[in-house]
Amino acid sequence: MTAELSDGTEIKNIHDVVEGSNGVHLKKEVSGGELERVAYIPYPNLLYVYHDN
């Protein structure tokens, strides 16, 4: 998945999105196959998250 932020930044290769009370936690797969949180994005800064084709 890819997340696009309000400033035009794209965060690619997202494997999981977890909704929090004020934003989303974006998780990527790290070495060993585990998922690790790589970013916390407040809702006002997040445009959308979409599945890559």
Image (cartoon, helix red, strand yellow):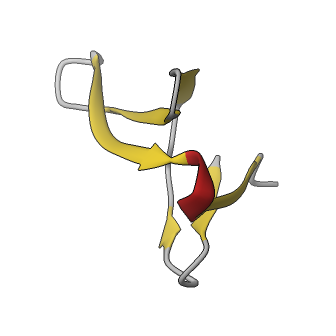
Residue at 51% x, 42% y is 14
Q: Residue at x 27, y 15 (%)?
A: 34
Residue 15 position within the rendered picture, expressed as x and y whole percent measured from the top left:
52, 32
Taking depth in this image into account, of 46 and 17 the one nearest to the observer is 46
Q: Position of residue 53 (x, y in %)?
A: 82, 54
Position of residue 11 relative to residue 24, above or below, is below
Describe residue 40's horizontal placement relative to residue 19 as left or right: left
**Considering depth in this image, is 27 or 40 the residue closer to the camera?**
40
Query: Residue 23, image x and y in percent?
Result: 52, 37
* Relative to 12, residue 17 above or below: above
Spot the residue most to the bottom.
8
The answer to whether residue 10 is left or right of residue 50 is left
Figure quadrant of residue 31: top left
Quadrant in the rendering for residue 6: bottom right
Q: Is residue 2 or residue 30 the one in the foreground?
A: 2
Residue 35 image offset from top left, x and y in percent: 33, 20
Residue, x 18% and y 18% (percent of image)? 32
Position of residue 4 relative to residue 34, above or below, is below
Most distant residue in the right direction: 53
Question: Which residue sits at x=53%, y=83%?
Answer: 7
Q: Quadrant of residue 25?
A: top left
Left or right relative to 6: residue 37: left
Comparing 37 with 35, the one in front is: 37
Left or right of 28? Residue 1 is right
